């Protein structure tokens, strides 16, 4: 059999969070001797190419979801035919990729079409229970559980016990999936620096605030506009990371003097910039939450309008006094920054690198020696 085993990692392209939380999985696969191939679309694919320029990166069909309604449910419902078509297209594309690239296993982060009878397929999600209105909850989650059930296993980036980060989104395990679920601990590409820059053992604050933008349009642009307008009138030094890895230049003269704008940053540079800023501003996406917890950073969280999952996480974490949260249409940076500084940000007790290591080892060891050759021949 060919060695090393070849694993396809395929995160969803909505925003950047699915791609960023796959970074530690990719590193662990490489550490255990696997050959990794990447596949995604849009900005997520651009980010992966920047993070792993040495790896093969393939393009998958885009779901191209737009959040124009205040309700995520209405937005998704209106675009459901387009989404289902994209899932069918990515399923077809995956079948060709598996054959052409000799893929031994697939790790799909929320790409429902990335399963194949020719390989072992892992699904990654923190939404075992999708927060939707009560009248449609049973139907939506039943469909979700059956879609995940198509995969050989489901990895949940959280811990199984209390306390945990994702709360009701990932707990308890649905009965249909209980034998397939492995909690692999929170995932992040961020790491607290091993050495701090000043002699007193404290991080030097290069910026008062760092705002990291992400998520679907047009809400990403709307948050950037609001942030710039309000920050321009405040006595703060702000670093604004636009979340546009496809862009390479910025017209600095079009922004106020107290705001430095960059299209995107590498994981290492962003890690350092967040750590050296006093307050973080950004979405309450689960990947962002995991990053902030790892760094122990004070934060003002602003859920994407209409995204119930982000609204739930923002409310949960604010109630636990971990972070401060505001709705986008009520954004007040003066209040938000001050309140964020008063919160007790969480620490990294939710990370279990041993669980991820064991999950990856079980995946690689569980691929039968004749698996790829026998299946690809049919």
Image (cartoon, helix red, strand yellow):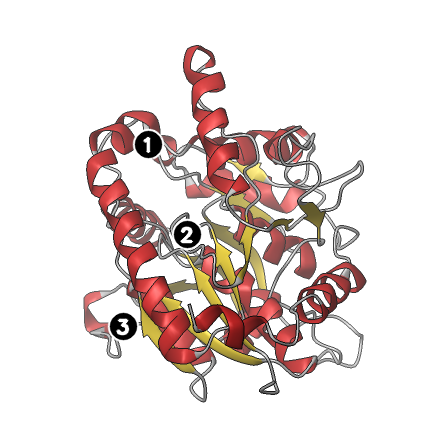
Q: Position of residue 248 (x, y in %)?
A: 26, 79
What residue lies at 29% left-to-right and 58% top-to-bottom? Answer: 92
Q: Residue 278 has which mark?
A: none
As helix, strand or loop, the secondary structure at mark 1 comes to: helix
Local crowd size for mark 1, using a 10 Å CA cut-off: few (<14), some (14–19), many (≥20): few
Residue 99 found in image quarter: bottom left
Q: Residue 246 has which mark?
A: 3
Q: Residue 329 has which mark?
A: 1
Whether residue 248 is situated above or below residue 242 in the rendered picture: below
Q: Residue 111 has which mark?
A: 2
As helix, strand or loop, the secondary structure at mark 3 comes to: loop
Residue 214 found in image quarter: bottom left
Can the viewer see residue 243 in this picture? no
Of marks 2 and 3, which one's residue comes earlier in the chain?
Answer: 2
Of marks 3 and 1, which one's residue comes earlier in the chain?
Answer: 3
What residue lies at 45% left-to-right and 57% top-to-bottom? Answer: 116
- 8, 219: nearer the viewer: 8
What residue lies at 44% left-to-right and 20% top-to-bottom? Answer: 139
Local crowd size for mark 2, using a 10 Å CA cut-off: few (<14), some (14–19), many (≥20): many
Question: Mark 2 and mark 3: span between their CA atoms?
Answer: 22 Å
**Drawn side of residue 3 relative to residue 83, left or right:** right
Q: Position of residue 44 (x, y in %)?
A: 37, 64
């Amino acid at each position: 059999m060919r060695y090393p085993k070849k694993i396809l990692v395929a995160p969803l392209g909505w925003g950047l969070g699915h791609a960023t939380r796959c970074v530690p999985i990719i590193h662990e696969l490489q550490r255990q001797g696997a050959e990794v191939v990447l596949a995604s679309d849009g900005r997520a694919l651009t980010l992966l190419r920047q993070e792993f320029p040495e790896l093969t990166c393939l393009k998958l069909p885009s779901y191209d979801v737009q959040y124009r309604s205040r309700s995520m449910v209405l937005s998704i419902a209106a675009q459901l035919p387009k989404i289902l078509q994209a899932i069918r297209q990515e399923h077809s594309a995956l079948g060709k990729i598996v054959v052409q690239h000799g893929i031994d296993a697939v790790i799909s982060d929320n790409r429902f079409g990335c399963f194949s009878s020719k390989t072992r397929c892992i699904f990654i999600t923190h939404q075992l229970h999708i927060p939707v209105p009560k009248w449609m909850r049973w139907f939506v989650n039943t469909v979700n559980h059956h879609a995940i059930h198509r995969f050989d296993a489901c990895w949940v980036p959280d811990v199984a016990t209390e306390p945990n980060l994702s709360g009701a989104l990932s707990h308890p395990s649905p009965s249909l999936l209980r034998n397939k679920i492995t909690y692999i601990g929170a995932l992040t590409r961020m790491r607290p620096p091993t050495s701090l820059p000043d002699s007193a053992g404290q991080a030097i604050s290069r910026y008062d605030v760092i705002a990291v933008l992400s998520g679907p349009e047009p809400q990403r642009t709307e948050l950037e506009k609001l942030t710039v307008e309000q920050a321009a009138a405040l006595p703060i030094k702000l670093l604004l990371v636009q979340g546009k890895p496809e862009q390479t230049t910025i017209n600095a003269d079009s922004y106020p003097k107290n705001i430095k704008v960059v299209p995107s940053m590498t994981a290492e540079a962003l890690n350092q910039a967040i750590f050296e800023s006093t307050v973080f501003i950004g979405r309450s996406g689960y990947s962002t939450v995991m990053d902030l917890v790892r760094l122990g950073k004070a934060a003002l969280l602003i859920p994407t309008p209409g995204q119930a999952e982000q609204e739930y996480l923002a409310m949960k974490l604010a109630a636990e006094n971990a972070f401060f949260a505001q709705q986008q249409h009520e954004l007040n940076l003066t209040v938000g920054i001050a309140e964020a500084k008063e919160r007790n940000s969480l620490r990294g007790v939710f990370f279990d690198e041993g669980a991820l290591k064991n999950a990856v080892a079980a995946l690689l060891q569980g691929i039968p020696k004749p698996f790829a050759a026998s299946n690809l021949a049919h």
